[in-house]
């Protein structure tokens, strides 16, 4: 992400961090339910990518237990400060970081949870490929939002565009190009959920030729569907 993008994100969410959880208090049970989709086991290592105020961190800690590792990465210091104020740093190690350039080694994680992240990555394929880099083969990625595409668009006073990156055809191609295999796709009023599995090296090699053009197509769809999305990368989506 460019320095301009960093500043825009931090300014937007920094001024809203203190009231974020109160504004969207009804979303918390949906976050907790969505963490089940990671199929975590005790002792696993998991990242909340763009953790915001850390609403998913306590349930993630419950899934992996005291022997597991929970990380929360976000770009906005005020969001991480709010997570600490609410005691969520007791559930996870908080990192001030761009999720497109994570300070983690290859294959360090078993899973990644990302709420409201996908539509706001400046380079979607590169961003999801970075998440794939830090997850072991066969690990999981959950892309989540507490509202489905149509409900979120209605809240923002718009309609979902034909180029919406979260539409199933676009998202499937994007994930494949980034090293993920889509397993489950749910788009209903009270949640958007896409569960993917990290491709193995053999699968990635086999699909490389087929995916060569998918990234460009997904990036083009993202640009076509950009209107009304908000200006955020590395923190929770504007509601």
Image (tube, rainbow, N blue to C red):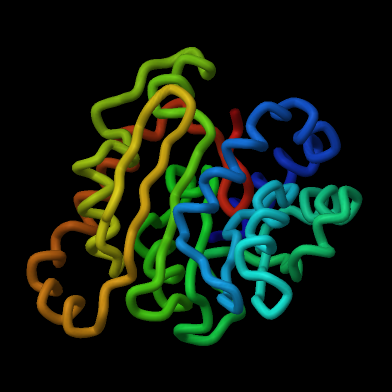
Residue nearer the viewer, 114 or 98? 114
- Which quadrant would residue 131 be assigned to in this image? bottom left
Residue 219, percent from left and from top: 29, 50
Q: Is residue 34 above or below residue 98?
A: above
Q: Is residue 159 above or below residue 207?
A: above
- The quarter of the image holding the C terminus is top right
Q: How many marks?
A: 0
Residue 161, percent from left and from top: 30, 25
Identity of the residue drawn at 41% across and 65% down: 140
Return the residue found at the far right: 85
- Which quadrant would residue 30 be assigned to in this image? top right
Residue nearer the viewer, 172 or 121? 172
Q: Is residue 50 above or below residue 72?
A: above
Identity of the residue drawn at 61% across and 63% down: 63
In this image, 228 relative to 30: left or right? Answer: left
Residue nearer the viewer, 229 or 192? 192
Identity of the residue drawn at 73% across and 29% down: 25
Q: Is residue 138 above or below residue 146?
A: below
In this image, 117 relative to 66: left or right? Answer: left
Look at the image and tell me whether residue 135 can be seen. yes
Look at the image and tell me whether residue 223 can be seen. no
- Which quadrant would residue 77 be assigned to in this image? bottom right
Residue 150, percent from left and from top: 39, 21
Identity of the residue drawn at 8% across and 72% down: 209
Residue 57, percent from left and from top: 69, 56
């Amino acid at each position: 992400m460019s320095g301009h993008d960093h500043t825009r994100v931090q300014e937007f969410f920094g001024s809203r961090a203190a009231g974020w959880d109160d504004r969207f208090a009804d979303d918390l049970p949906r976050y907790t339910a969505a963490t089940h989709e990671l199929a975590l086991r005790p002792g696993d290592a998991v990242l909340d990518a763009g953790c915001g105020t850390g609403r998913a961190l306590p349930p993630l800690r419950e899934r992996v237990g005291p022997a597991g590792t929970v990380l929360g990465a976000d770009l906005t210091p005020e969001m991480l400060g709010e997570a600490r104020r609410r005691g969520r740093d007791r559930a996870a190690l908080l990192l001030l970081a761009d999720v497109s350039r994570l300070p983690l080694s290859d294959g360090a994680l078993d899973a990644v949870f990302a709420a409201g992240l996908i539509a706001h990555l400046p380079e979607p394929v590169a961003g999801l490929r970075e998440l794939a880099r830090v997850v072991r083969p066969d690990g999981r990625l959950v892309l989540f939002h507490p509202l489905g595409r149509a409900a979120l668009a209605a809240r923002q006073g718009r309609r979902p565009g034909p180029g919406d990156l979260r539409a199933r055809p676009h998202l499937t191609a994007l994930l494949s190009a980034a090293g993920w295999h889509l397993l489950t796709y749910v788009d209903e009023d009270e949640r958007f959920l896409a569960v993917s599995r990290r491709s193995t090296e053999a699968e990635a090699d086999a699909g490389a030729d087929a995916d060569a053009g998918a990234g460009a197509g997904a990036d083009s769809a993202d640009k076509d569907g950009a209107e009304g999305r908000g200006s955020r990368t590395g923190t929770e989506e504007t509601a």
